[in-house]
Amino acid sequence: VQLQASGGGLVQTGGTLRLSCAASGRTYTNYAVGWFRRAPGKERDFVAGISWSGSSTTYADSVKGRFTISRDNAKNTVWLQMNSLKFEGTAVYYCAARYSRSAYVRAEDYDYWGQGTQVTVSS
């Protein structure tokens, strides 16, 4: 499956962005999806994950209550709604997919990756 992440941009602290991760090649239905981010000079960190059905989601503590992951399998798309963005949210955001019911929090558990989209939060 090929993944295309989009929706990044420049936003002020406290602002909102919605990232999209569109799949092609195969249906998303049987794939759990995760969002990760890599800030400059740092490791790639887990942000949020969603099960193949959308019934289960998980979030990093740093984004709980501010970010929401959702999906529409009919549209082969997963979204990451990011509200109340903080300066430390500046990073390249990646979506990833794994052929499984449940989402995982480790990057090495995912088999397919999108190219990343830059999010810059100005202070």
Image (cartoon, grey):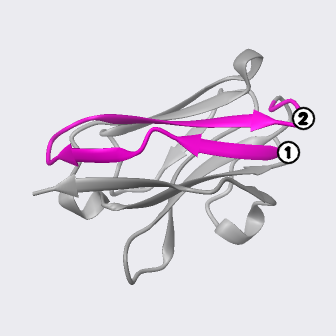
At 53% from the left and 58% from the top, the residue drawn is 36
Image quadrant holding the C terminus, namely bottom left
Q: Main secondary structure of the magenta part?
A: strand
Q: Is residue 40 above or below residue 109?
A: below
Q: Is residue 2 left or right of residue 8?
A: right
**Residue at left 74%, top 49%?**
97
Q: Is residue 95 left or right of residue 39?
A: right
- Report which quarter residue 26 is drawn in: top right
Looking at the image, the residue that sits furthest to the top is 74
Judge whether residue 102 can be spotted in this image: no
Q: Quadrant of the N terminus?
A: top right
Residue 26: give its label. Answer: 2
**Disc number placed over residue 116 in the picture, else none:** none
- Taking the magenta stretch, the answer to whether it contains residue 21 is yes
Residue 65 covered by magenta stretch: no
Q: Position of residue 81 (x, y in %)?
A: 41, 33
Q: Is residue 104 above or below residue 79?
A: below
